[in-house]
Amino acid sequence: MLDFLKSTIKEEVITIALIIAFSYVLYFFGKKIIHNCFKDKSKKAQTLKPTLNYAFNILIVIMATTLILPEIGIEFGALIASAGIFGLLLSLGMGAIIKDFFQGIIIVFEDLINIGDEIEIKNIKGKVIDFDLRKTTIQAKDKIYYIPNSEIIIIAKQKNGNNSN
């Protein structure tokens, strides 16, 4: 009986190690592919690159988790049902964050804001130094402002001749 447990645990540990190793290799190659796709220094590339990296990281973690959980004995069907109920409750409490996220997606796909743009949002004039799906970071004179994307309603973008998207 003890030998059976040892061999079963050993198999599970090896399987989990292989899943983690495969996830790391996939992570490494995915980062490389994203980096090679956005080699140019355009504002749009500098905006999309970190956003895609973040989404890819989440995808790898979800994939690895869904493969590892059954190996450690957690029933996945019940977990998904529980996650659905928990997700509903969480979404009610996190409405602003979800709104930020979807507004960020709209901003990215409509190419409204790119890193390096001179913009004005809510009477704050400055340069976009960071952008992700949840917030926009603007440097204005000696202050840095973090503006949730759901708060961005009107954007005044500085127009100049060498603005390359």
Image: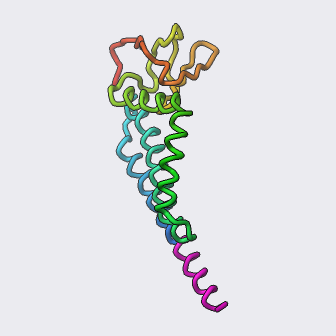
Q: Toward which corner of the image does residue 161 lie, by quadrant?
A: top left
Q: How is the image coloured?
A: rainbow
- Residue 97 in the image: state x and y as whole percent: 52, 31
Q: Nearer the viewer, residue 160 or 80?
A: 80
Q: Is residue 57 above or below residue 91?
A: below
- Residue 69 in the image: state x and y as whole percent: 53, 65
Q: Nearer the viewer, residue 149 or 117?
A: 149
- Residue 95 in the image: state x and y as whole percent: 51, 30
Q: Is residue 89 above or below residue 81?
A: above
**Residues drawn in magenta:** 1-17
Drawn side of residue 51 relative to residue 162, left or right: right
Instruction: Single out the residue that lies furthest toward the top.
Output: 123
Residue that appears at 59% across and 86% down: 7
Q: Is residue 145 above or below residue 80?
A: above
Q: Nearer the viewer, residue 137 or 106?
A: 106
> Does residue 6 belong to the magenta stretch?
yes
Q: Is residue 66 above or below residue 121?
A: below
Quadrant location, the N terminus? bottom right
Majority SS type along the magenta span: helix
Residue that appears at 36% across and 12% down: 160
- Residue 165 in the image: state x and y as whole percent: 33, 26
Instruction: Single out the residue that lies furthest toward the right.
Output: 2
> Does residue 138 belong to the magenta stretch?
no
Question: In the rendered picture of this protein, how many numbered marks are placed on residues?
Answer: 0
Q: Nearer the viewer, residue 146 or 79?
A: 79
Residue that appears at 38% across and 51% down: 33
